[in-house]
Amino acid sequence: MTQRVNQTGFTLVEMLFALAFMAFLLIFATTTVIQIMQTYNKGLAVKEINQTARSTTEDMTRIIKASNPSAIVTSPLTNSPSTSKARVCFGSISYVWNFTNATLNKYTDGTRINFARVNDPGSSLCTLTAGNYPNVDKTQATELLSSNVWVQQLTVTPTVNNTFYDVFIQLSTVDDPTSPALTYSWANPIPEQRVVCQGGNIGQYCAVANFSTSANARGGTN
Amino acid sequence: MAYRLQRGDTLVEVLMAIVIMSMVIVGALTIMSRGLAAAQIALEHSEVRLSINSQIEVLRFARDSYIKNNTDPSAAQWSAIVAASNANPITYDSSCTVSSGKQPFYMTKNGTQVTRNVYTPSTPTTVAVPGKGLWIETVLSPSGISPAYIDFVIRACWQGAGSSTNQQAVTAQRLYDPTR
């Protein structure tokens, strides 16, 4: 009994102070961690956009330079994301992708393609078979993008009497459909301005990058 | 009794600890955001580099057209480039001004030919594109040198995202012209 009387705990005020202090510290730590995570993710996405676009455009220009213009098939490539078959064939190598989160192009095992470079001699992927373009054999394909990055636009346009090909690639970070950070205006005549990063809610980030280059198709014609 | 003997940190000690921790966190965040800005600028440089490569490809096409066939409309553009060139050296500075005495230009393509366009100086707020922040200056080879050549200096200048200074990219390409 006497022992119990001698026990002393914290007063209510002390307890409240301690709790408030802990809460403050926790909130501070949590926001910091979230901030660091976002910066890290954004850095990763920007790096991936940069790397993919650079290696892809470089690869495409090299292929175009070595190609005979008549072997390049750009007909399945349209710029309307909802209906596009999203592929281009250079005779030996083909590129197949999906715009944003579409699932039009698939591998033969049924999984979705993000952006693939495929060994495809004879451009069979750009040849209609029974009204459809064939699915992609996974063993012949290399996936170029992770799921953090979307292909927004990709065009390969012949110009200067079909001896030049203009390549335009627009990549962006993945957008949240419930609170979009990207705004779309497909009617805009300037392709670079069709998808713009406006910034969404606090904590959301976005990045859009446009890469355009051109190459002279000299293969077979000198 | 035991309670009275407890010794915790004083308020000053606790405050010092918080201040030090905040400084470390602020420092780390600053470094991270600086790294992000550097990544963004690297991205812009890649975009500009592709446009520069494209310009070189077009110049080479104009030269090749000229050598192959003098009546091609693209070949006439090469003659125009040569006519507007001189042997004066190029001067660089950090404010991205066109070298004095040079006639800056940029190349475009349409369905049938490549074209030389006169460049009007401007600094774009976003990434440099041909005609807007991206231009070409030429230096003719000194007379008596065979084969004659033209040094093309493709220069780009733009206001990088989140950076106060102008970004610059310069590439030189020498094209020989054995007909001259």
Image: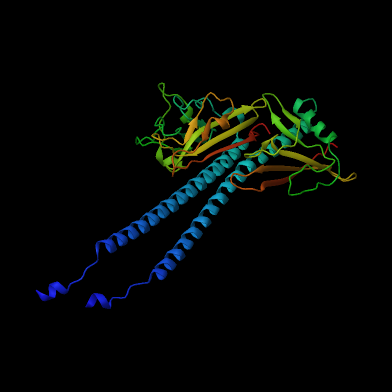
Q: Residue furthest right?
A: B144
Q: Residue furthest top?
A: A131
When the figure is inspected, residue B29 is found, relative to residue A151, above or below; the finding is below
Q: In front: B78, or A20?
A: A20
When the figure is inspected, residue A14 is found, relative to residue B131, above or below; the finding is below
User: By what rule are the colours in the image chosen?
Assistant: rainbow
Where is residue A149 drawn, in percent x and y? 46, 41
Quarter holding the N terminus of chain B? bottom left
Residue pictured at 51% horizontal, 48% vertical: A47
Residue pictured at 25% horizontal, 61% vertical: A12
Residue pictured at 46% horizontal, 51% vertical: A40
Where is residue A200 drawn, in percent x and y? 46, 38
Quarter holding the C terminus of chain B? top right
Q: In front: A95, or B171?
A: B171
Number of numbered discs on residues: 0
Q: Is residue B26 visible?
A: yes
Relative horizontal placement of residue A174, taking residue B9 as reference (left or right): right
Where is residue B4 drawn, in percent x and y? 26, 76
Q: Quadrant of residue A62?
A: top right
Where is residue A85 drawn, in percent x and y? 46, 27
When the figure is inspected, residue A19 is found, relative to residue B56, above or below; the finding is below
Q: Quadrant of residue A82?
A: top left
Relative horizontal placement of residue B111, taking residue A144 as reference (left or right): right
When the figure is inspected, residue A12 is found, relative to residue B64, above or below; the finding is below
Q: In front: B91, or A33?
A: A33
Relative horizontal placement of residue A218, taking residue A48 as reference (left or right): right
Residue pictured at 57% horizontal, 29% vertical: A191
Q: Is residue A120 visible?
A: no
